[in-house]
């Protein structure tokens, strides 16, 4: 069974540009999560999809971040325009059930904004 | 004040040692506690999950939760070089959310 896959694995963009990160959850997992870790900080929750609906987006830092999950399959996280403080690693995760006890993480998309 | 505090280390031990990793937390509503292991440039991998207080054992790993002290621990027996990684504690308050609150992670090095 394929795990959570994320693309791109690494991205370097200039301040003000746009970046779109993609996540493919494990097949059959209705729950999809985005987390991120900026330098020197802990991993922080961004949002949670159940199928195509946003269940909890309380962790989204501001309106420069837009997450979508059309059709309830893969998800994208767009940062527009990117700022220096957006640099970090963005993790996608998925789980089958809603309890969230078994959440599987992808390897992350490393974003550097210069 | 952070909701979850975890000493970032690094922690260096000889092979075969017993390792103790700990987290403290401030939110008394946390009910579900997890430990993740993360190798360099990889995603977090779930090691142990515990509900409420008590102990849970899985092979060389034992997780303990003391809700009265708001303190959780992960013990690794007979540590191996392959255990060298960053260990993250994570927790959440209710069963109807996947929002995990993470500690900063402790970097462990097990020397042969």
Image (cartoon, rainbow, N blue to C red):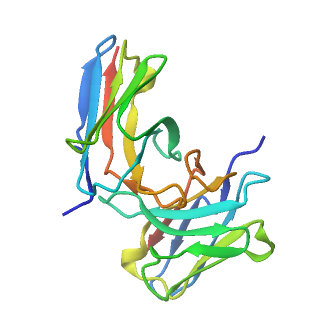
- On screen, residue A23 above or below A16: above
Q: Is residue A70 left or right of residue A97?
A: right
Can you give x and y, in whole percent of width and height, for residue B8 in the image?
25, 44
The structure residue drawn at horizontal position 44% and vertical position 73%, both measured from the top left corner, is A59
Q: Is residue A36 left or right of residue B67?
A: right
- On screen, residue A94 above or below A60: above
Placement of the C terminus of chain B among the 4 image quadrants: top left
In the rendered image, is residue A79 in sight?
yes
The structure residue drawn at horizontal position 25% and vertical position 26%, both measured from the top left corner, is B12
In the rendered image, is residue A114 in sight?
no
Can you give x and y, in whole percent of width and height, for residue A68 in the image?
67, 78
- On screen, residue B77 above or below B102: above
Placement of the N terminus of chain B among the 4 image quadrants: bottom left
Can you give x and y, in whole percent of width and height, for residue A49 in the image?
64, 69
- On screen, residue B93 above or below B12: below
Residues B20 and B98: in front is B98
Can you give x and y, in whole percent of width and height, for residue B81 in the image?
40, 20
The structure residue drawn at horizontal position 36% and vertical position 53%, both measured from the top left corner, is B30
Residues A105 and B59: in front is B59
């Amino acid at each position: 069974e394929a795990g959570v896959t994320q693309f791109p694995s690494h991205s370097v963009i200039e301040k003000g540009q746009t970046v779109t990160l993609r996540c493919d959850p494990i097949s059959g997992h209705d729950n999809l999560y985005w987390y991120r870790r900026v330098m020197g900080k802990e991993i922080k929750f961004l949002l949670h999809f159940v199928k195509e609906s946003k269940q909890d987006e309380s962790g989204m830092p501001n309106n420069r971040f837009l997450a979508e999950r059309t059709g309830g399959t893969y998800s994208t996280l767009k940062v527009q325009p990117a700022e220096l403080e957006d640099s970090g690693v963005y993790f996608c995760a998925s789980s089958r059930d809603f309890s969230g006890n078994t959440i599987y993480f992808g390897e992350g998309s490393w974003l550097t904004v210069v | 004040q952070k909701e979850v505090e975890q000493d970032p280390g690094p922690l260096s031990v000889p092979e075969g040692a017993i390792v103790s990793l700990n987290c403290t937390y401030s939110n008394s509503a946390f009910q579900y506690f997890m430990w993740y292991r993360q190798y360099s440039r990889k995603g977090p991998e779930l090691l142990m999950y515990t509900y409420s207080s008590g102990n849970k054992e899985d092979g060389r790993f034992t997780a303990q939760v003391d809700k009265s002290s708001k303190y959780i621990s992960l013990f690794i027996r007979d540590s191996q070089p392959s255990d060298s990684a960053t260990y993250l504690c994570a927790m959440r308050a209710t069963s109807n959310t996947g929002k995990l609150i993470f500690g900063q992670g402790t970097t462990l090095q097990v020397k042969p």
